Amino acid sequence: MSNAPSTSNAASAEKLRDRERYLAKLIVPPGKRIVLAEDYNPSFTADFTHKKEAEQQLAENIAELAKYQEILYAQNTYALLLVFQAMDAAGKDGAIKHVLSGVNPQGCQVYSFKTPSSEELDHDYLWRSAKRLPERGRIGVFNRSYYEEVLVVRVHPEFLDAQQLPDSARDNIWKRRFEQINAFEKYLFENGIVVLKFFLNVSKEEQRQRFLARIDEPEKNWKFATADVKERGFWDDYQRAYEDCLNHTSTEWAPWHVVPADRKWFTRLAVSEIVIRTLKQLNLRYPEVSEDRRRELLEIRKLLEAEG
């Protein structure tokens, strides 16, 4: 029996090392060129072979995330911005819903970016995102983001015509936008907004199966849009755009994580692991009260006790 605690500690340490190893495989190394189709497997599930095992770990992570989110909110120093990008049907909505299911709504804000409005087109492309940044102490979620400007707009360059750009701004536009986004995210990081970026990497075949399910299951019909199938025809163009984007905008201050998305249960688990790992690294603490404030609280306590 005397060896039980050390055995338990060793098992916990090994589990932590396993977690770090598989999370490291999901990061796009800053400065190193990756090939999306060769370096990242959409069906990867690390050492998890059973859905129930992953769901149990996810439940534990959700509870832990709720704890850290409360401290983040109380400390009111940092903000966390989660950016989700993916092909259609990759599971962004489900990942956001499940991972943040235990978070206090007061400390979280989610925003989905759609086609830019006329007002938004009258501003620079980062304007609408800057308006939606999370406040200190909060977790913000971008379901799609300013990265659409180097993804969907790159695949459909005709969308640039609606942005009313001067001719000079269209020279080397993708290179410039990568640089601008990197600078924007560095500015956020240096001001206490931690940016976590997730590309949910779904395979073409899995997307096809999910589209079929959206047609065959009446309760999923509302999720299906004809435009989704049209965009599927540009699959190779999108893969090239994503690969170039990941290679140019994964930085030390805002790295990309390529999260396997063919198994939704693993996608949700991996995202939760990355978020918790990041919050732990912030060394969050509840605010400490001054000695004067502590004495004031003790006096209030005496008054309340006297009422009894």
Image: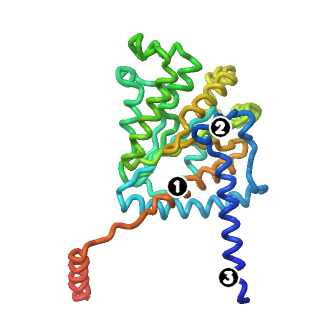
Q: Nearer the viewer, residue 303 or 87?
A: 87
**What's the residue at 39%, 21% (across, down)?**
121
Q: Is residue 305 left or right of residue 138?
A: left
Q: Which mark is residue 90?
A: 2
In this view, the residue farthest toward the right is 49
**What's the residue at 24%, 77% (across, down)?**
291
- First-in-chain label (1 vs 3): 3
Residue assigned mark 3: 5
Q: Is residue 217 above or below residue 191?
A: above
Which quadrant holds the C terminus? bottom left
Residue 213 visible = no
Residue type highlighted by circle 3: Pro
For label 3, the SS is helix
> Could you say which quadrant of the image residue 209 lies in?
top right
For label 2, the SS is loop
Residue assigned mark 1: 278
Residue type highlighted by circle 1: Thr
Mark 2 nearby-residue class (10 Å; few <14, some 14–19, many ≥20): many
